[in-house]
Amino acid sequence: MRYEVPRNGVDLTEAPFEWPDGFKHEVVGKLIDLDWRRYPALDQSEVKIKVAAFFGIDPDSLLLTRGADEALRLSFQHIKREAFSS
């Protein structure tokens, strides 16, 4: 299968616009004070509530993970549980 660039020239993992400089500086300013050696805390309920409010959805419909490893592990555990529960 050959990869083709979408018609609008934007891949699904790319933003169709440039972020404002003020937003970029604000994000960098907040990131600089974080401990980069560690994953975020296990309890992400406060972040989950804010993300859900921003998108106008129920927080219980969100699954926040601390990286791809955790997302894949949880996905495979769910699939395994579903496959062997019937």
Image (cartoon, rainbow, N blue to C red):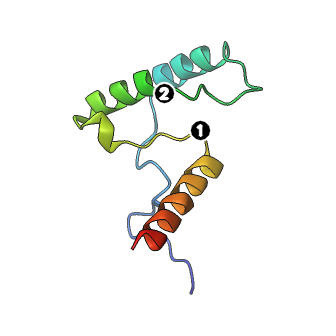
Residue name at image x 45 percent, y 48 percent: 15
Q: Is residue 40 left or right of residue 22?
A: right
CA–CA distance between discs 1 and 2? 9 Å
**Is tag 1's residue or tag 2's residue first in the polypeptide sequence?**
2
| 27 versus 12 height, above or below | above
| 79 versus 73 height, above or below | below
Residue name at image x 73 percent, y 25 percent: 36
> At which x and y percent is residue 86?
39, 74
Tell me, for residue 7, which label it has, or none: none
Find numbered disc 1 in the image and state the secondary structure of the residue it sits on. loop
The three-letter code of the residue at mark 1 reads Arg
Q: Which residue is mark 2?
A: 44
Q: Which residue is mark 1?
A: 66
The three-letter code of the residue at mark 2 reads Gln
Q: Look at the image and tell me in which quarter the N terminus lies.
A: bottom right
> At which x and y percent is residue 63?
43, 43
Q: Nearer the viewer, residue 68 or 32?
A: 68
> At which x and y percent is residue 79?
48, 66
Residue sitting farthest toward the left: 56
Q: Nearer the viewer, residue 13 or 86?
A: 86
> At which x and y percent is residue 49?
34, 26
| 25 versus 86 height, above or below | above
- Badge 2, how many Cα within 10 Å: few under 14, some, many 20+? few
Q: Is residue 34 left or right of residue 51?
A: right
Residue contact between numbered discs 1 and 2, judged by CB atoms under 8 Å: yes
